[in-house]
């Protein structure tokens, strides 16, 4: 009798859970002979002993314990795959767990999720907003949005969604009532509003002008670890800020916020979508990734 290895893994797991061959056979609806043959097949294939047998019970060897751990993970993934195939042409169901930067998440995720759920009402989202570095490989997130100037090499699957730029700006009122800087060297004479993560120094502001890069070490009068708070300070005319375009695009278009030193181009900040490098991708996650690609990569304004 030829026993496939997937069935052998189910047998190993059943024996581990039930404690002996007979109960495992009953649980699986197999004969004891078929269970024994499955164990023998896998042991011969791996050239190891998986169980210590005696007349009363069986115990997993060290290799058997490792095999059982992998079997549980592999069988779970296989069962998810079968469920996904069965649901391929049915209504999408289940949860998608997502992590995103705080300010970007506040600005965009509500509309994105609402639009997706209007099309797929069976989908729920678990959302974490976090500006700290997330080790995607060690997390249980389905997808992680990351804003970065450059990503480190990794085994993750990465999709670049959109580019933003840092913009030097102030409110229309500040623009109208103050003598404005003519160069980056004059900026520290103004009240500056800067982003700074907790217990970290303010990062330099980098400008590109006539094929040269100028670096300013800002001396802020106000700094915060949340860009939305900085945006509020801008709107209240507290000073000049250097922040990503996605936070202020609407106000730039309306004229409430004015960009400064337009001959000086700020650094680019890219939005990436990251996920585990796993062979199996649930249909609900795959469909959401396609939705995001349509929103971002096809040029639709988000």
Image (cartoon, rainbow, N blue to C red):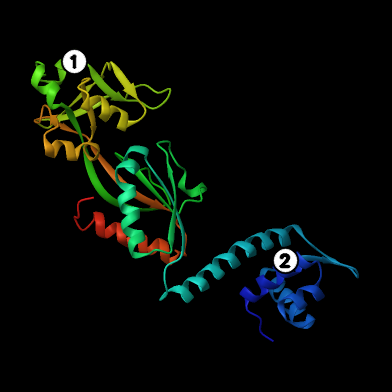
Q: Position of residue 265 (x, y in %)?
A: 15, 33
Q: Position of residue 99 (x, y in %)?
A: 42, 46
Q: Residue 37 vs residue 210: left or right? A: right
Q: Is residue 182 visible?
A: no
For residue 48, the mark is 2
Q: Residue 46 vs residue 204: left or right? A: right
Give the residue number, with chain letter if any, for mark 1: 190
Kindly indicate the quadrant of the structure image that contains residue 131: top left
For residue 125, the mark is none
Rendered residue at 20%/55% (across/down): 300
Can you say which quadrant of the picture contains the N terminus? bottom right
Q: Is residue 195 above or below residue 6?
A: above
Kindly indicate the quadrant of the structure image that contains residue 148: top left
Disc on the earlier residue, 2 or 1: 2
Rendered residue at 34%/43% (across/down): 105
Q: Is residue 216 visible?
A: yes
Q: Position of residue 158 (x, y in %)?
A: 36, 52
Marks 2/1: CA–CA distance: 73 Å
Kindly indicate the quadrant of the structure image that contains residue 39: bottom right
In the image, farthest residue toward the bottom: 1
Q: Position of residue 49 (x, y in %)?
A: 76, 66
Rendered residue at 73%/81% (across/down): 30
Q: Is residue 6 above or below residue 168?
A: below
62 or 258: which is nearer to us?
258
Q: Secondary structure at mark 1?
A: loop
89 or 12: which is nearer to us?
89
Q: Secondary structure at mark 2?
A: loop
Q: Residue 77 vs residue 2: left or right? A: left
């Amino acid at each position: 009798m030829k026993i496939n290895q997937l069935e052998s893994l189910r047998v190993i797991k059943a024996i581990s859970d039930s404690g002996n061959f007979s109960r495992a056979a009953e649980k699986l609806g197999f004969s004891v002979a078929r269970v024994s043959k499955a164990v023998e097949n896998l042991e011969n294939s791996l050239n190891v002993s998986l169980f210590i047998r005696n007349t009363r019970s069986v115990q997993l060897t060290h290799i058997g314990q490792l095999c059982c751990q992998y079997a549980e993970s592999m069988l779970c993934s296989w069962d998810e795959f079968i469920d996904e195939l069965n649901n391929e042409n049915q209504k999408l169901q289940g949860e998608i767990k997502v992590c995103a930067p705080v300010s970007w998440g506040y600005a965009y995720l509500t509309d994105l999720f609402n639009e997706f759920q209007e099309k797929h009402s069976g989908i729920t989202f678990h959302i974490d907003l976090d500006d700290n570095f997330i080790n995607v490989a060690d997390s249980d997130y389905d997808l992680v949005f990351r804003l970065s100037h450059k990503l480190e090499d990794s085994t993750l699957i990465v999709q670049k969604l959109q580019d933003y730029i840092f913009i030097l700006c102030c409110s229309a009122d500040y623009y109208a009532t103050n003598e404005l800087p003519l160069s980056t060297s004059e900026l520290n004479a103004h009240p500056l509003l800067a982003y700074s993560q907790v217990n970290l120094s303010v990062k330099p502001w980098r400008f590109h002008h006539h094929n040269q890069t100028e670096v300013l070490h800002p001396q802020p009068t106000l700094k915060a670890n949340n860009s939305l708070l900085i945006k509020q300070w801008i709107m209240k005319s507290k000073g000049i800020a250097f922040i990503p375009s996605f936070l202020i695009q609407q106000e730039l278009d309306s004229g409430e916020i004015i960009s400064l030193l337009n001959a000086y181009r700020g650094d680019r900040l890219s939005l990436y979508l990251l996920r585990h490098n796993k062979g199996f991708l649930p249909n609900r996650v795959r469909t959401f990734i396609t939705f995001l690609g349509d929103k971002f990569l096809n040029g639709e304004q988000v």
